[in-house]
Structure formats: structure tokens, C-alpha cells
Image (spheres, rainbow, N blue to C red):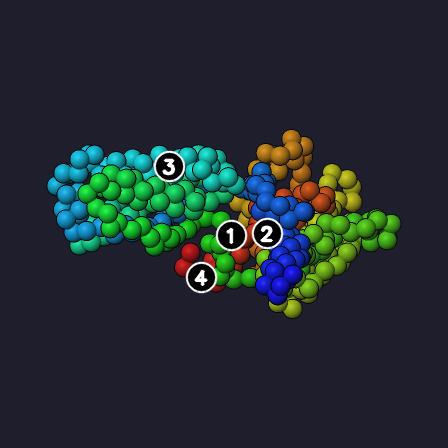
Amino acid sequence: MDSSEIGKQQSGVNDANWRINNMNEFSHLDSKGDVKMVDVTDKTATERMAKAEGKIHLQQATITLIQDNSIPKGNVLTTAKIAGIQSAKKTAEIIPMCHQLNLSFVDLEFELGRELIIIRSIVKTREATGVEMEALTAVSTAALTMYDMCKAVDKTMTIGAIKLVEKIGGKSDHAVEYRPSVGIVTMSDSISADKSEDKSGPILVKGFADSGCKADHQKVLPDGSEELIPTIESWIKDGVELIITTGGTGLGPRDLTLQFVENKFDSKLPGIEQALHAYGRDKVKTAMLSRLTAGVMNGAIVICLPGSTGAVKDALKVLIPTIFHSFHMMKGEKH
């Protein structure tokens, strides 16, 4: 075996090791490192938009024929536009791991230059995942359609510079949002007595830490503890800006978290409560029995959640990243 073959073999081993070591970072890979479709079942449907553009280079004479509608195959721009719209709607059938989306709007426009045509697309939806691929597919197909219609009169055409221009919706919108300092309080008699393990608190800590927040304040208190309010007030003085409690929101006589906290609110945040309830009801009917609250206390946001792991996981999906925007609002910044 020569050195080149050894190098190729080693490269293959390194690539395999890299896939194994990094597959948890990519949602398109399963536990074996093989490709898979991303599960967006639990993601919240939001308004999403994407814009893409590309270029097709042609001879000036070809541009003139297109403008004069003199290409033998027909109206190039109209046909390319229809093709682009159709392909955007069929993207999931072309790109294997794309999701089928209910597109609410697709459009294309063309800018004719001396020896090129710039193709621009815009795609909109209200779904759980974005429409970047739909926008890019629309541009690509429109360019290919132009090529097909003009290839008999122009052998010099080239297609290129297809790129995503803008994307709205999803977590990337909030990539530069302010990240507050976070504190987590678990309310539970059994956990405070070391009779059971705190699972919900660590889920919240990890969820906010993974989103870029400093989440180094954590405490466990028994249900109905009078230490809850002093703990919250002390953390706020220490600079904690977002405090989440989990547990103590049931219907039992010692489930007093909401009563304690709501009495200290300067103002309530009913929209957060409604969003959390709505998300839970869509998944589990018994979510209508859950009690929770959210409000502002001494300049910090306090949210009280049920104690189950399912409830806090759902809350993370609802709150992150939208909750971060509230801190811009509280500072009087543009929003």
C-alpha cells in the first residue's frame, strides 16, 4: 500500500471519527451518524420568510430577444416565474430531508442587465420550520428554465451566485438578542428532603445555558416555603433578571407558589401565560388543569411553572428565544 492510499484510508478513519464525535451537534444525523429528517413536531409554528437570488449570464442579443418576447419557445420571464413558483411548492419532493410546508406566498422578479438577469425570490409561510430551501429552489428552477428556453440561441449561458439573501423567523432572528441572567427555584417537599431527584430544575438550567444565558443561581425549597420571596428578591438584587420557579402550582393545600409570587408582581404578563397554556393544550388535554403565572417584580421577570419535566421542556420551547426580546422592551429600546 503506497503513501497516498494510506493517506486516503486515514482520512476516511478521521472522517468517521469526526462524524461520531460531532453527530450530537447536528440534528440531521442520528445516533449512528446517518442522515435523518429533523423532527419539528414540537416546534411552534411562526411566521417565516426567506429571500434568495441568483444570476444567469447571457449574451446581450439574447437579453434583447427576451425583452422583445422573440425567443422561439415562448415568453421566457413568464415561464420562468411559473416554474419557480411551482418548484418552491414542490421542494420537499426534490430535496430529500426538506419538510412539506404549506406556503402562503411565493413570488419571483427579474432584473435585466446588459449581459445578465438577476433572479429574486421571496417565500412566506407560517410553519414550524423555515423556507430557505424553497426560496433557493425557486431561483434555481427559474434560472434552469431560462437556460432551457434560450439554449437554442445562446451557447454561452452560465448560471451562478445563487444565495440566500434574507431569512426571517426561527431562532436565528434572535441570535444577537440580549441574554439575561437566570435563576431557577424548584419547589418540592420530596426533593428538598432528599427523597427524590430534582429533574425539572436542571432541565431549565441547561436549556437557558445552552441558549447563551448565565444560569448559575439555583435553589430547592419545600412547597409553601416562606423563603421563596426573600430568595427571589435577593437574586434580583444580585442582578438576576429572569427567575423561573418549577413546582408548587398544583391544587394541593401546600401548592402556594402562585399565591406568594402574584402578590409581589408589579404587573402581570398574561401573554406568556396564554402562550404556555396554548402550547400545552395542543399536546395534552389535562394541560387545562395546570396553573402558572408570569409577571414583573422589581424590574425582573418571574415565571412560575408546573413541576413536571414535560411542562418545563414545553416552556423552554415557548420561551426561548422570544422571552429575551422582553428585556429590550423593558429598557425602552425599539422593538
Q: Position of residue 223 (x, y in %)?
A: 78, 49
The residue at 75%/44% (across/down) is 255
Q: Please, what is the three-letter code of the amino acid marked with disc 1?
A: Lys
Q: Pointers 2 and 3 in contact (CB under 8 A)?
A: no
Marks 2/4: CA distance?
37 Å
Residue 128 visible here: no
Amino acid at pointer 2:
Phe
Residue contact between numbered discs 2 and 4, judged by CB atoms under 8 Å: no
The earlier-in-sequence mark between 4 and 3 is 3
Vertical side of 88 occupied by 118: above or below: below
In 3D space, how far apart are the residues under numbered discs 1 and 4 (Cα atoms)? 23 Å
The answer to whether residue 121 is above or below residue 161 is above
Q: Is residue 11 above or below residue 124?
A: below
Q: Secondary structure at mark 4?
A: loop
Neighbor class of circle 2 (other Cα within 10 Å; few <14, some 14-19, many 20+) is few
Under circle 2, the secondary element is loop
Name the spot of residue 245 as percent of width and height, x first: 68, 52
C-alpha separation, residue under disc 2 versus residue under disc 3: 27 Å
Q: Earlier in the sequence, mark 1 or mark 2?
A: 2
Q: Which residue is mark 1?
A: 171
Question: Which element is circle 1 on?
Answer: helix
Q: Please, which residue is most extreme toward the bottom here?
A: 238
Q: If you read the primary sequence from the N terminus, does the residue marked by circle 1 or circle 4 appear first?
A: 1
Residue receiving disc 4:
332
The answer to which quarter of the image holds residue 270 is top right
Which mark sits nearer the N-terminus, 2 or 4?
2
Query: Which quadrant holds the C terminus?
Result: bottom left
Drawn side of residue 195 relative to residue 231, left or right: right
Residue position marked by numbered label 2 in the rendering: 26
Residue in the picture at 34% in, 45% down = 139
